[in-house]
Image (cartoon, coloured by chain):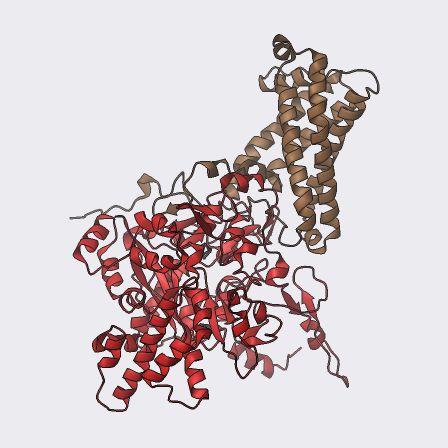
Chain colours: A red, B brown
Amino acid sequence: MRVMAQMAMVMNLDKCIGCHTCSVTCKQAWTNRAGTEYVWFNNVETRPGLGYPRGYENQEEWLGGWVAKNGRLSLRAGGRLKKLLTIFSNPKMPSIQDYYEPWTYDYETLLGAPAQENFPVARPYSLISGKPMNVSWSANWDDDLGGSLEHAAKDPMLKGIEDKVTFEFEQTFMFYLPRICEHCLNPSCAASCPSGAIYKRSEDGIVLVDQDRCRGWRMCVTGCPYKKVYFNHKTGKAEKCTFCYPRVEVGIPTVCSETCVGRLRYIGLVLYDADRVLEAASIEDDHALYEAQRSLFLDPNDPAVAAAAERDGIPGDWIEAAKRSPVRRLIQDYAVALPLHPEYRTMPMVWYIPPLSPVVDVIKDTGYDAEDKDNLFAAIETLRIPVEYLANLFTAGDVAPVNRVLKRLAAMRSYMRDINLGRDPRDEIPESVGMSGEAMYEMFRLLAIAKYEERYVIPTAHAEQAHALEELATDCPVSEYGGGQPEGILGEGSGRPTPVAAENLRMLQNRQRADSLENPLIGGGSKQGRVNLLNWDGIGMPEGLFPDRDAETSRETSGDRS
Amino acid sequence: MNTVLWVIYPYICLAIFVVGHFWRYKYDKFGWTTRSSQLYEDKLLRIGSPLFHFGMLGVIAGHVMGLLIPQSWTSAIGISPHTYHYIALIGGIPAGLATVAGLIILVYRRRRTGPVFSATTVNDKVMYLVLGIVILLGIWNTIAGSLLQFGGEYNYRDGVSPWFRSIFYFQPDAALMAGAPIGFQLHAFFAFLLFAMWPFTRLVHVFSAPIGYFTRPYIVYRSSDVRPGVGVGTHAPARGWDRPELQKKE
Ligand code: SF4
Ligand code: SF4
């Protein structure tokens, strides 16, 4: 047994309102640069729908992830030899059109327009070619089932249940699926990288691209079945979600979690047995993969595990944090979180609590009591859609675990109604789904009340390692604009990068926990006129986002408003 | 003049080549990339790029064979200059043609695909020009000089090759090159110019051929603490004498 710690996330899909705040703040923090215009480390998809990039889940087409044959695991897109033979032109890489062609508007025409009878119009211009373009696709073009007959009907996950899903508006169902990099236990992106530039941090399992080692071979883009490695077309390097490591290292949650309106994201540690990852990923039966991955997770409350973890160099406070980890509780104790596409065999570590709301909605529409356990249970049993659809997403098509999870959520709903209405709690409800009343109440607290300290249990990185932490020791992709030359003679972004100061984030954390706001205006250091949300904590205004009031008034008084 | 062209100039170029790479690697690891444009366009690239690169590998192999292996060795194992010549042409011409075909496709693509063209820097353009000249002169020498034997027969293995080798054992012999046909002289001249430009262009990606992929495990684990080699990234690890030390004062 080799114990390793993994920073992981769980998202509670019932609460996602599809507001895209997470995507926007993530973009503002990490990918608001030239070369990454089309890149969304965090994106929110409406399901059923094609997703971003278009139809990425169809691995027959995109060849991402692993396949198991005769108990051996191999990359679907081909092994080492094939990779090197096709290195001069990646045979399977999504083109910019599969993501979308990024654009901006020609705002100058609006600002510079003289007084005239007709409104001036800002035309869209492509950020790739610089030419005027017709906007006809984007990262969430089919948001809220827009154009669903055309787009959602092509969702690869509808395979086998097409005939049962209808896209008549009154009868269909939908939910939102926010996605980030899965920080997999068995990452196929790393395995595909010829240069060995993508690595998994042994402390917290965050998967990162070493920007200095990446040579731009693009094999990782193909290798990742979730299409969560992106190619920066200006710097010629791969970039991916970083799990906001500079924030997590000092114990504050990722930007997407911090800003999530639905407060549906949970961050915490899980301990797992690294020696058995390969074995678990090689199990041939797709349906067994969910349980296989769960079997890797170790219980930190077990003294033997805690001792082994200590032996393997996991600090004591991390073991404590693993005990309190909301992620571990949701995956292991309550077993209501499921992995996204376990059949890709990368052992993803961002898990999801499937939404009960499509079922609740159906019952409500028929006029029955949607908080009654029996109604809900019956509906889960008989409504094959959306349960089969959810199973295609979360359990490789096995409906049994999805049924189990939905029943637990349904039971919680009825059980808590009694309590909230001041009736006697009926313990047979939790018992019918194999839980104790107490556990169900705890689960309710975690899911519904979802206090900040309960949602995020993030131990800080260790001070004795501080001199060598990523944040201090290598560059991070955003930082290059601080000191590098934007147009160096050796191409965009060449030259030395300047790291984001970890110092700032430490101060930020202190401030976040302080009682008073001394200076609410120092939100986060903006760099060269950019608004940087990476170190904004939601208190006060981020610097540079709004015009400076004083400057504004002084300009007004001096009458200089050119 | 001959000394300047065939002794001093090559040494300067090679010195720039070596020191330049060293400097670039230290100073600009982040800029060390293929700068692929596959994201913008991939139909032409899919044909052009492998043609060019595999052709180029063949051409490089041919140069290694022709320049580095002395004629006396091949004669010793019973290959007459004539036979050698045939072998070289049979291997060299297809490789050369593939390279040129690939180059033409790639240059066409670069010019005609809007986004690819706008991603092309001045640096790239100059490099493509010199690279193109070197390749075309090389092809000219092979076809016009060796195959059709314009301007009489010339055995470069008696002239160019010994000269090239002589550079590396520091007894440069300019006279060997002075007697070569103008086509070979120009080819060599531009090739050395290309060597001098090399470290400052995207050609550096040649030296990142990922051979280690065959031997490393699929999944790389790396601690943020332990850095293999002398400091991964742009920061060197702290020196032993830089460590903070507690100095107790009475
Ligand atoms: S989801 Fe993330 S860690 Fe997993 S394969 Fe894709 S990029 Fe790599
Ligand atoms: S911010 Fe939260 S609620 Fe809004 S789309 Fe993102 S995950 Fe959903």
Q: Against A346, is B154 above or below?
A: above
| Residue A532 is at least partly visible in this image | no
For this rendering, which residue is in front, A390 or A118?
Answer: A390
Residue ranking furthest to the left: B250
Kindly identify the residue that appears in the image at 37 percent across and 51 percent down.
Answer: A283
For this rendering, which residue is in front, A499 or B30?
Answer: B30
Kindly identify the residue that appears in the image at 45 percent across and 70 percent down.
Answer: A388
In which image quadrant can residue A122 be found? Answer: bottom right
Ligand 2, image quadrant it occupies: bottom left
Q: Against B131, is A346 above or below?
A: below
Q: Against A352, is A376 above or below?
A: below
Q: Can you give x and y, in whole percent of width and height, for residue A310 in the image?
A: 21, 51
Kindly identify the residue that appears in the image at 73 percent across and 82 percent down.
Answer: A119
| Residue B98 is at least partly visible in this image | yes
Kindly identify the residue that appears in the image at 51 percent across and 46 percent down.
Answer: A214
Q: Can you give x and y, in whole percent of width and height, for residue A200 in the image?
A: 39, 50
Q: Can you give x and y, in whole percent of width and height, for residue A49 in the image?
A: 54, 70
A255 sits to left or right of A151 = left
